[in-house]
Image (cartoon, rainbow, N blue to C red):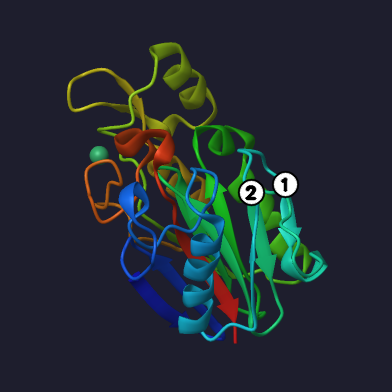
């Protein structure tokens, strides 16, 4: 179920893998999204299993649209799923979930206030600055000092893009420009995210540096599996 699980001060953070759920077929087994055709009751059961394992009172998720909107979980009514790409929490027992398959999952942890967040960052989010928007929102609630964890994603040797698109990303985040292992234009979103976090002075642990979702069957991958790909996730909760 968990690729990585760690407690930092009053915040617990976790990245999931594909194991430990009830989905079958291309969604085997801990698929956390219904956007791909999986049975919604089974997906809800997978999410409930995850929430139970982490002993959460509530797990808030979001409909991710490759934007830069940030939402606080305590402002989301029960049963609602906000449209956003960053979800923050400062209420004990309320977890926040980001779901990915090749995009980059980021967890932010406040060090001087019990605040945490998750961010969904793909190529568009990198250019739009969704990570910076989440950091700014956390700082507005009094967290000056924070740390970040960056998870598994499509690596810069696999994530091929048309040259003009790769160049457009590099014009905003030069560190993200890459080349595929077969010599064509590519983007390394993870490297771009890490560069953005470090530019903000945020110590960053890149646990996904050598964990490419396209190459590694332990993860779901949109590029490898196509439309029916499942989603794995990253979660943060204040204790
Ligand atoms: Zn790769």
Q: Residue at x 29, y 36 (%)?
A: 224
In the depicted structure, whether residue 8 falls above or below residue 144: below
Mark sitting on residue 40:
none
Location of residue 216 with respect to 227 vertically, above or below? below
52 over 33 or under it: above or below: below
How packed mark 2 is, by other alpha carbons closer than 10 Å (few <14, some 14-19, many 20 or more), is many
Q: Where on the image, by quarter, is ligand 1? A: top left
Q: How many marks?
A: 2
Q: Is residue 15 above or below residue 50?
A: above
Q: Is residue 121 visible?
A: yes
Question: Disc 2 vs disc 1: Cβ atoms closer than 8 Å?
Answer: yes
Residue hosting label 2: 85
Q: Is residue 148 visible?
A: no
Identify the mark at residue 69; answer none if there is no mark.
1
Camera-side residue of 76 and 29: 29
Q: Is residue 29 left or right of residue 184?
A: right
Residue 57 placement, left or right of 47: right
In this view, the residue farthest toward the left is 182
Image point 51% across, 70% down: which residue? Answer: 45
Alpha-carbon span between mark 2 and mark 1: 6 Å
Instruction: From the top left corner, tell me how far across and down residue 67 is, in percent.
Output: 66, 39
Judge by depth and name the residue closer to the eye, 79 or 123.
79
For the C terminus, give its image quadrant.
Answer: bottom right
């Amino acid at each position: 179920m968990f690729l990585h699980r760690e407690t930092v001060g009053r915040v617990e953070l976790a990245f999931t893998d594909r194991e430990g759920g009830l989905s079958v077929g291309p969604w085997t087994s801990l698929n956390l999204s219904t956007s791909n055709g999986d049975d919604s009751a089974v997906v809800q059961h997978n999410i409930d299993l995850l929430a139970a394992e982490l002993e959460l009172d509530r797990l808030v998720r979001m409909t991710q649209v490759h934007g830069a909107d940030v939402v606080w979980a305590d402002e989301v009514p029960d049963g609602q799923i906000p449209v956003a790409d960053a979800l923050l929490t400062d209420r004990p027992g309320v977890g926040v979930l980001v779901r990915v398959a090749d995009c980059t999952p980021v967890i932010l942890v406040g060090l001087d206030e019990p605040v945490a967040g998750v961010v969904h960052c793909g190529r568009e989010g990198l250019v739009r600055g969704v990570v910076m928007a989440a950091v700014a929102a956390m700082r507005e609630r009094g967290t000056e000092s924070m740390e970040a964890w960056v998870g598994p994603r499509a690596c810069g040797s696999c994530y091929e893009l048309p040259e003009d698109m790769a160049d457009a990303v590099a014009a905003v985040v030069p560190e993200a420009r890459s080349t595929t292992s077969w010599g064509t234009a590519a983007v390394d979103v993870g490297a771009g995210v890490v560069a953005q976090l470090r530019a903000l002075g945020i110590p960053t642990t890149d646990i996904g540096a050598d964990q490419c979702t396209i190459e590694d069957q332990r993860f779901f991958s949109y590029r490898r599996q196509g439309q029916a790909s499942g989603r794995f996730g990253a979660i943060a909760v204040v204790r």
